[in-house]
Each structure stands twice: as structure tokens, then as C-alpha cells.
Amino acid sequence: MIEFPQYRKLTNNRSYYRIEDETHFMEIQLIGARLISFNIHASQYPEIIKIKDMLTCQEPYLMSDSFEFDHYSDKLNM
């Protein structure tokens, strides 16, 4: 059984993810010097597959951790 939350990032280090469960995740995107966040509830098949790919670290997703995610999350709240 997978313990949540799980953390992932894209290989280009421009998007960071906190996966809450098999159908919910938060994404923080770095666009230039700006940060944008999204809360996603996966209700459609492509979104569900995206979460499965993230959990299994399929390309382009890599393992990350709470420290890396929180670094950007803290900047969102400034």
C-alpha cells in the first residue's frame, strides 16, 4: 500500500507535485519568475492515468520530497 502524500517533479524542474491520494494532487508550476498552483481532482481517465504515471515515476516524472515541494509552496504564500 502506498503512503500519502507522495512527492514528484518533472525532469525539467519546472513543476512540482504533492499527490494526496489516487485522485487528488496539487501542482506548483514555475513560469519564468512566477509560481502558479493548481489543485486537481482526477475525475477523467487521462487525469487518473497521469497520477498513476506520477506514482510509478514514469518519464517525465521523478521522485521528489516534501522539502522541495514546501520550498515553492512557501513562496506562493508570500
Image: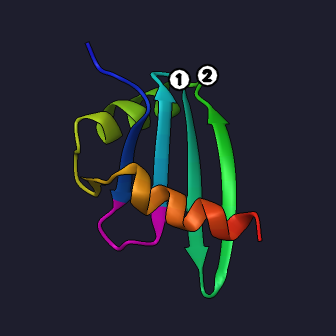
Q: Which amino acid type is marked by label 1?
A: Thr
Magenta span:
10-15
Q: Residue at x 23, y 53 (%)?
A: 59
Q: Residue 51 in magenta?
A: no
The relative height of residue 77 versus residue 48 in the rendered view (above or below) is below
Q: Neighbour class for label 2 at 10 Å: few (<14), some, many (≥20)?
A: few
**Screen quadrant of the C terminus:** bottom right
Q: Position of residue 77 (x, y in %)?
A: 75, 63
Contact between marks 1 and 2 (CB within 8 A): the answer is yes
The relative height of residue 36 versus residue 66 in the rendered view (above or below) is below
Q: Position of residue 14 (x, y in %)?
A: 46, 72
Kindly state the secondary structure of the residue where label 2 is placed: loop
Kindly state the secondary structure of the residue where label 1 is placed: loop
Looking at the image, residue 5 sits to the left or right of residue 24; the answer is left
User: Label 1 belongs to which residue?
Assistant: 23
User: Label 2 belongs to which residue?
Assistant: 43
Main secondary structure found in the magenta portion: loop
Q: Residue at x 63, y 87 (%)?
A: 33
The relative height of residue 25 versus residue 44 in the rendered view (above or below) is below
The quarter of the picture where residue 60 lies is bottom left
Q: Neighbour class for label 1 at 10 Å: few (<14), some, many (≥20)?
A: some
Q: Residue at x 31, y 54 (%)?
A: 64
Looking at the image, residue 8 sits to the left or right of residue 27; the answer is left
Q: Earlier in the sequence, mark 1 or mark 2?
A: 1
Q: Residue at x 48, y 57 (%)?
A: 69
The relative height of residue 3 versus residue 14 in the rendered view (above or below) is above
Q: CA distance from mark 1 to mark 2?
A: 7 Å
Q: Position of residue 57 (x, y in %)?
A: 23, 44
- Mark sitting on residue 70: none
The quarter of the picture where residue 54 lies is top left
Q: Nearer the viewer, mark 1 or mark 2?
A: 1
